[in-house]
Image: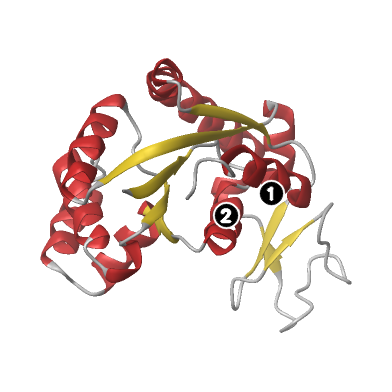
Amino acid sequence: MATFIVLLGPPGVGKGTQAKILADTKKLAHISSGDLFRENIKNQTELGKHAKSFIDKGELVPDDVTINMIRERLNRPDCEIGAILDGFPRNPAQAVALEKMLAEFNGQVKAVPYITAPESVLVERISGRWTCRANGHIYHQMFNPPKQTGVCDLDGSDLYQREDDKVETVTKRIRVYLEQTIPLVEYYRKSGKLIEVNGAQAVEQVSLDLCSAVKNIIL
């Protein structure tokens, strides 16, 4: 049976990074819902056009559109033995739909690692990010500062802080995520599949803890 892992975690916890590391370590495909949306919209697929029509109006993309994108992705050869799901599902209804869909692929969700960290840590991580205006290179005032303040090391262009990375916006994003995710976290907790991982540690330690948490699950 194919093995699927749903990775949960708030903005700033390093979920995307950990998903890639885990996927590489366990030789599983990494399916990021955000990447999937961008790919479909860029390639102007029917699903991408449909999703964009909602996004352009500032509306949420309906569950069935997202689910169909995931189904199409699961049909690709690299998902035959399973995958790491990053950014999907987002609510219990999507989780139920995912279970039904995975049954079609002779697969099931075996574990749901939930990477957590205090809000103060998450805010510090995101609000410290600065972006290169020319090519989008990312810096962090604490973890990866540029050699010269406000200037990109690679192309010399000025650095700016995106609206999404400002403290007030970041705080709101995190709180909204946590409020919206509580039902999903509880859904997986009741199923016995939720595994909490301390995301406030160094990236390497989080990776070790994450791999340890799922080592007996992936066959």
Does residue 131 sit above or below 8 in this rendering?
A: below
Q: Residues within 10 Å of mark 1 (few under 14, many from 20)?
A: many
The extreme bottom residue here reads 155
* One can see residue 82 in this view: yes
Q: Is residue 175 left or right of 201 when viewed as pictured?
A: left
Asked if the residue at tag 1 contacts the one at tag 2, i.e. Cβ–Cβ closer than 8 Å, the answer is yes
Q: Using the image, tell me which numbered label, if any, was put on residue 22.
A: 2
The residue that appears at 54% across and 58% down in the rendered structure is: 26
Q: Position of residue 77 (x, y in %)?
A: 28, 70
Q: Position of residue 6 (x, y in %)?
A: 43, 41
Disc 2 secondary structure class: helix
* One can see residue 54 in this view: no
Does residue 23 sit above or below 54 in this rendering?
A: below
The residue that appears at 31% across and 68% down in the rendered structure is: 39
Q: Is residue 176 left or right of 59 when viewed as pictured?
A: right
Disc 1 secondary structure class: helix
Nearer to the camera, 117 or 156: 117
The residue carrying mark 1 is 207
**Which quarter of the figure has residue 166?**
top right
Label 2 or label 1, whichever comes before in sequence order = 2
**Which quarter of the figure has residue 141?**
bottom right
Q: Amino acid at mark 1?
A: Ser
The residue that appears at 39% across and 24% down in the rendered structure is: 184
Q: Amino acid at mark 2?
A: Leu
What distance separates the C-alpha of mark 2 from that of mark 1? 7 Å
**Which quarter of the figure has residue 52?**
bottom left
Does residue 164 sit above or below 154 in this rendering?
A: above
The residue that appears at 33% across and 61% down in the rendered structure is: 79
Q: Position of residue 159 (x, y in %)?
A: 70, 66
Q: Position of residue 75 (x, y in %)?
A: 21, 63
Q: Is residue 219 left or right of 60 when viewed as pictured?
A: right
Q: Is residue 3 left or right of 210 when viewed as pictured?
A: left
